[in-house]
Image (tube, helix red, strand yellow):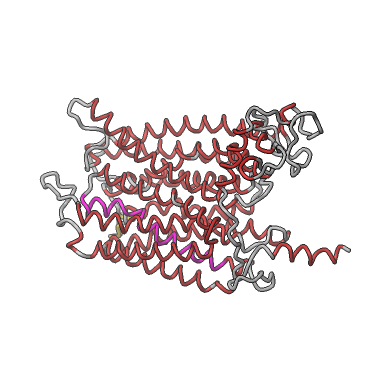
């Protein structure tokens, strides 16, 4: 009997995925690590291309487009923030209309076109203002405006649109190659996520060393062109695996059920739900009956107001009554939102390492060693966290570590020490007469590298392991983790502008902490101290919400958080 049931189960599991011709996939021919390897190839190449652009963009914007330091920093953080915010659009289009494969192909070509245009803009003199030394205070450099600025921003945000919509779909499409109903493949899925982060780290490391070196010594036009070539290689790799993929068809938007539950619960806010009587069981009562689709004990007691969405009155359907699975999905999303919000400040810290820390390095001695005439490109210092990740991620996978929430807490605390280190080094740099070695900046990058491994991997694992009764939301949760990056970079832009404006108004000479293009005239050290304080307060805030989340699990059992 058991032997007879196994083929049936496999068949049912595979019917939800299709091959490249739209026919049910064959588990012997489609999916698995072989198919996922092609997606990993695209992930590695894509991050290599986008990281080489984003991590050295501030240098290009200041030296070639002649934007001020604060405006340049905001241009970079807005660009990167937009990338991660657009991951929601990519997830929506994939879930609702296109599926992962076609979403990846369409937006990969959009990103490639943006990189090509960016390379052309950097190469043609008529698309840039006249060359000028921005660090020379005696010269007035012409800022890029009008058609020049238009071409630059069109190219930049074509790249952002393509990359943003790619990110959640690359992760999801790779994960789709593993049948979670098969125990062996389910274990391989865990290894795939670690492999994906490893590919990400390899791509970042090559971008921040080799590609940034090309940008520094051969020109930004050549550097952007190399990024375009790398992206083209990623697209070729992705297409090469077409015959091996398991493709999940679009299942509809996950946002519609969320709105549906809220609307249904609001319409029935005055009715009494059986679960409001304080019991987990759904025993018969004289109150309005719960929808017939709700089994006993399935509706949790957290956010009990939403349980009213399951009350069924006669022949109701659509937006007036919901299945219990939809209600539980919305509850899960609400429950994890505070955890998500607490990681935004972490990514604001990351934004400083990609902007102001690069400028710090530009004003220091960049020799690799004193006896060797080899200078480290300032942006290449950002490779230090990813070099650490290459060493630590395999260890992270092999060791039995604590659950995700404590790891995220440790990562958030370490990000505070990263800013403390940055503040101390900047203070020393400003008050030292000799040129300080760029290696003084290494500690802040090393500390943040460990912090990122704990926080970023922990957050992905935490979201992925949420108990989703009906499934189908994991891709969207992946997109939400990318939104943390987006909000963090946007918050950085707001903080930079706000701090500069407030400190300028408080200054007798009208000069803020971040007004001047020359860091020697700014007070970046004080800005770092402010970020360290905000980061620590955010850590304390996280401890409160993670405890609230954990206590709810212990009280409710089976994932129930008893919040009324």
Residue 492 placement (x, y as % from top left)? 37, 40
Q: Residue furthest right?
A: 1
Quarter placement of the C terminus: top right
Q: Is residue 536 above or below residue 366?
A: above
Image-based side of 209 in relation to 299, left or right:
left
Residue 218 placement (x, y as % from top left)? 27, 65
Residue 330's image quarter? Answer: top right
Q: Nearer the viewer, residue 75 or 538?
A: 75
Q: Is residue 20 above or below residue 254?
A: below
The answer to whether residue 431 is seen in the rendering is: no
The answer to whether residue 476 is seen in the rendering is: yes
Q: Nearer the viewer, residue 97 or 225?
A: 97
Q: Residue at x 37, y 52 (%)?
A: 381
Q: Residue furthest left?
A: 138
Residue 210 placement (x, y as % from top left)? 37, 63
Q: How many marks?
A: 0
Residue 500's image quarter? Answer: top left
Image-based side of 248 in relation to 62, left or right:
right
Q: Nearer the viewer, residue 389 or 236?
A: 236
Quarter placement of the N terminus: bottom right
Residue 363 placement (x, y as % from top left)? 26, 47
Q: Is residue 67 above or below residue 167?
A: above
Q: Residue at x 23, y 48 (%)?
A: 67
Q: Residue at x 53, y 58 (%)?
A: 94
Image-based side of 451 in relation to 357, left or right:
right
Q: Residue at x 50, y 36 (%)?
A: 342
The region drawn magenta spans 37-66
Q: Nearer the viewer, residue 280 or 338?
A: 280
Q: Main secondary structure of the magenta part?
A: helix
């Amino acid at each position: 009997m058991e032997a007879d049931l196994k083929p049936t189960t496999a068949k049912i599991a595979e019917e939800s995925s299709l091959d490249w011709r739209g026919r049910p996939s064959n588990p012997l021919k489609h999916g698995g690590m072989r198919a996922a390897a092609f997606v990993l190839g695209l992930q590695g190449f894509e991050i290599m291309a986008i990281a080489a652009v984003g991590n050295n963009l501030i240098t290009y914007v200041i030296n070639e487009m002649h934007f001020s330091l604060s405006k340049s920093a905001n241009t970079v953080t807005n660009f990167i923030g937009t990338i991660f915010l657009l991951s929601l659009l990519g997830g929506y289009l994939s879930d609702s209309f296109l599926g992962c494969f076609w979403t990846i192909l369409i937006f990969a070509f959009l990103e490639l076109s943006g990189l090509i245009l960016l390379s052309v803009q950097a190469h043609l003199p008529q698309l840039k203002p006249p060359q000028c030394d921005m660090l020379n205070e005696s010269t007035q450099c012409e800022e890029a405006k009008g058609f020049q600025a238009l071409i630059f921003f069109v190219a930049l945000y074509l790249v952002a649109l393509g990359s943003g919509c790619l990110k959640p779909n690359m992760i999801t499409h790779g994960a789709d190659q593993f049948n979670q109903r098969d125990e062996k493949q389910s274990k391989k899925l865990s290894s795939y996520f670690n492999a994906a982060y490893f590919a990400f780290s390899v791509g970042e490391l090559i971008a921040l060393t080799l590609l940034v070196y090309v940008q520094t010594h051969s020109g930004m036009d050549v550097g952007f062109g190399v990024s375009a070539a790398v992206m083209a290689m990623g697209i070729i790799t992705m297409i090469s695996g077409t015959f091996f993929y398991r493709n999940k068809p679009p299942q509809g938007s996950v946002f519609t059920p969320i709105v549906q539950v809220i609307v249904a619960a609001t319409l029935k806010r005055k009715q009494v739900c059986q679960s409001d009587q304080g019991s987990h069981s759904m025993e018969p009562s004289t109150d309005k009956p719960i929808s017939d689709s709700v089994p006993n004990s399935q509706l949790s007691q957290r956010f009990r107001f939403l349980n009213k969405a399951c009350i069924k009155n006669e022949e109701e359907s659509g937006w007036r009554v919901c299945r219990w699975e939809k209600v539980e999905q919305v509850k899960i999303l609400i429950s994890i939102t505070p955890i998500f919000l607490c990681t935004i400040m972490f990514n604001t810290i990351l934004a400083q390492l990609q902007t102001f820390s690069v400028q710090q390095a530009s004003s220091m001695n960049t020799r690799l060693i004193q006896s060797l005439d080899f200078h480290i490109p300032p942006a290449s210092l950002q490779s230090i966290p990813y070099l650490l990740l290459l060493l630590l991620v395999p260890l992270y996978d092999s060791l039995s570590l604590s659950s995700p929430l404590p790891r995220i807490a440790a990562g958030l605390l370490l990000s505070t020490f990263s800013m403390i280190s940055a503040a101390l080094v900047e203070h020393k740099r400003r008050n030292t007469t000799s040129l300080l070695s760029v290696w003084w900046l290494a500690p802040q990058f090393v500390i943040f590298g460990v912090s990122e491994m704990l926080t970023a991997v922990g957050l992905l694992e935490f979201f992925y392991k949420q108990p989703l009764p009906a499934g189908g939301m994991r891709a969207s949760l992946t997109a939400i983790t990318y939104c943390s990056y987006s909000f963090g970079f946007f918050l950085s832009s707001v903080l930079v502008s706000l701090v500069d404006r407030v400190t300028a108004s408080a200054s007798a000479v009208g000069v803020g902490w971040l007004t001047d293009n020359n860091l020697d005239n700014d007070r970046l050290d004080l800005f770092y101290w402010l970020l360290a304080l905000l980061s620590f307060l955010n850590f304390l805030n996280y401890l409160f919400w993670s405890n609230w989340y954990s206590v709810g699990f212990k009280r409710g059992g089976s994932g129930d958080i008893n919040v009324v």
